[in-house]
Image (cartoon, helix red, strand yellow):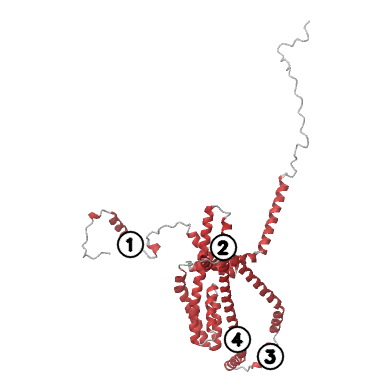
């Protein structure tokens, strides 16, 4: 009888290795469901909100401090303008603080004297115009009655003006705006004091400011900053110097005209024309000429016409003859670039931008010119502004070939033979 342990022939023996136990499923905590928020998202949202809050806070602070920043910018350019005078006085052994105080005192005395003289002139002229107003009104009414066959009288016009609604509204608005005008005057005085204080510190502590700025920069950057500072001082001082010289020439020329015509307050009017026309860009000429024309009209209407013609002619002489010669070595900026810079400065910062636009652009142009590599311009008629005539190119090539050839093979021309063109 066969044993039960025997396997049938051809059967596969069983695997002696015990089967592996079934793998247990991972715990539920280790499996992250797909609908759960990523861990980095809350931190990213908090960071974005923090950056947005910082941006809003910085924007609010910038708008609140914009007036102070503009005053500091004006003070910086004023300090650059007086830096040459302070530097010369300091080089002779005077302390910078004392030298700056002397320069500021001189500017203050000159400004106060000009304002006092101009205010006295305007006050006297206004009083005279008010006293002469009835006579002017009578002459105008007589001319209207004669020309248009009307029957107007000064009493009727005065009554209609006094009882008019627009005059009453104007008086009410003027009375309510007195406090606003006072607040603006106080604010303007505070701004002037702020500008004077910062400009004094910038001028008196100029070397210390430059050392503090250069102490946080590597040596190569320090040289560039000091070079830019020197260029800014040179251009700003040159701009003020050239404008002052042109103001002196303009004032002297207008004084001769006004004194010849017998216009009252000729010295004050000449100073007004010289300063306003030079230090208020673009519209300064028209503002400067309006006041002497008005005062000349009170003397004689034909005198006003002569003053207007002289202002226009002198402005052309100054733009095309005087200004290019005086500013060639100081500012050296193209008139179109100067006009564009004034327009851009006005659009950005208003009247302040118009005042500082030209020296700022001149400084930037000089600083970039020191680092921009320039090449010799080819001798081409299109570059020189001349039109190329027919046959000029072939003639130029022939001449070049003759110069490059062997000079010994060229026939010598007699010294008495005229040169052929």
Q: Nearer the viewer, residue 252 or 372?
A: 252
Asked if the residue at tag 3 contacts the one at tag 1, i.e. Cβ–Cβ closer than 8 Å, the answer is: no
> Furthest residue to the front?
93
**Label number found at residue 159:** 3
Residue drawn at (50%, 87%), measured in percent from left and top?
261
- Disc 1 marks which residue? 392
- Disc 4 marks which residue? 124
Q: Considering the numbered disc 3 on the image, is that residue within a helix, a strand or a loop?
A: helix
Q: State which tag comes first along the sequence, 3 or 4.
A: 4
In which image quadrant can residue 10 be found?
top right
Q: CA distance from mark 3 to mark 4?
A: 28 Å
Q: CA distance from mark 1 to mark 3?
A: 82 Å
Name the image quarter holding the C terminus: bottom left
**Label number found at residue 356:** none
Q: CA distance from mark 1 to mark 4?
A: 71 Å
Q: CA distance from mark 4 to mark 2?
A: 44 Å
**Label number found at residue 206:** 2
For disc 4, the neighbor class at 10 Å (few under 14, some 14 to 19, many from 20) is: few
Q: Considering the numbered disc 1 on the image, is that residue within a helix, a strand or a loop?
A: helix
């Amino acid at each position: 009888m066969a044993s039960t342990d025997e396997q049938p022939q051809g059967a596969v023996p069983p695997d002696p290795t015990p089967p592996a136990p079934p793998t247990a499923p991972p715990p539920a905590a280790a499996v992250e469901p797909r609908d759960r928020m990523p861990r980095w998202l809350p931190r990213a949202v908090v960071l974005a909100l923090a950056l947005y809050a910082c941006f809003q806070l910085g924007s609010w602070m910038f708008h609140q401090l914009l007036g102070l920043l503009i005053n500091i910018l004006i003070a910086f350019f004023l300090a650059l303008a007086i830096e040459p005078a302070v530097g010369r006085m300091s080089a002779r052994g005077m302390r910078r603080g004392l030298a700056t105080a002397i320069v500021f005192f001189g500017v203050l005395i000159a400004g106060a004297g000009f304002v006092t003289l101009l205010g006295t002139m305007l006050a006297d002229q206004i009083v005279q115009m008010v006293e002469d107003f009835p006579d002017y009104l009578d002459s105008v009414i007589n001319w209207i009655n004669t020309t248009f066959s009307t029957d107007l009288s000064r009493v009727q016009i005065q009554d209609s003006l006094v009882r008019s609604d627009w005059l009453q509204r104007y008086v009410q608005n003027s009375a309510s705006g007195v406090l606003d005008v006072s607040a603006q005057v106080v604010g303007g005085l505070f701004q002037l004091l702020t500008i004077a204080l910062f400009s004094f510190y910038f001028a008196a502590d100029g070397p210390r400011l430059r050392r503090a700025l250069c102490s946080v920069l590597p040596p190569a950057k320090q040289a560039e900053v000091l070079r830019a500072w020197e260029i800014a001082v040179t251009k700003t001082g040159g701009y003020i110097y050239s404008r002052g010289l042109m103001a002196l020439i303009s004032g002297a020329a207008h004084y001769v005209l006004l004194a010849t015509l017998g216009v009252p307050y000729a010295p004050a009017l000449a100073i007004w024309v010289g300063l306003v026309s030079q230090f208020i860009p673009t519209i300064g000429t028209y503002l400067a000429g309006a006041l002497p024309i008005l005062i000349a009209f009170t003397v004689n209407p034909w005198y006003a016409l002569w003053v207007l013609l002289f202002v226009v002619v002198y402005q052309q002489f100054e733009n095309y003859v005087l200004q290019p010669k005086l500013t060639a070595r100081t500012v050296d900026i193209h008139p179109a670039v100067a006009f564009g810079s004034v327009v851009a400065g006005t659009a950005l910062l208003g009247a302040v931008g118009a005042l500082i636009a030209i020296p700022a652009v001149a400084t930037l142009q000089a600083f970039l010119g020191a680092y921009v590599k320039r090449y010799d311009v080819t001798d081409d008629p299109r570059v020189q502004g001349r039109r190329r005539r027919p046959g000029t190119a072939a003639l130029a090539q022939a001449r070049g070939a003759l110069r490059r050839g062997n000079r010994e093979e060229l026939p010598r021309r007699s010294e008495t033979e005229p040169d052929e063109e």
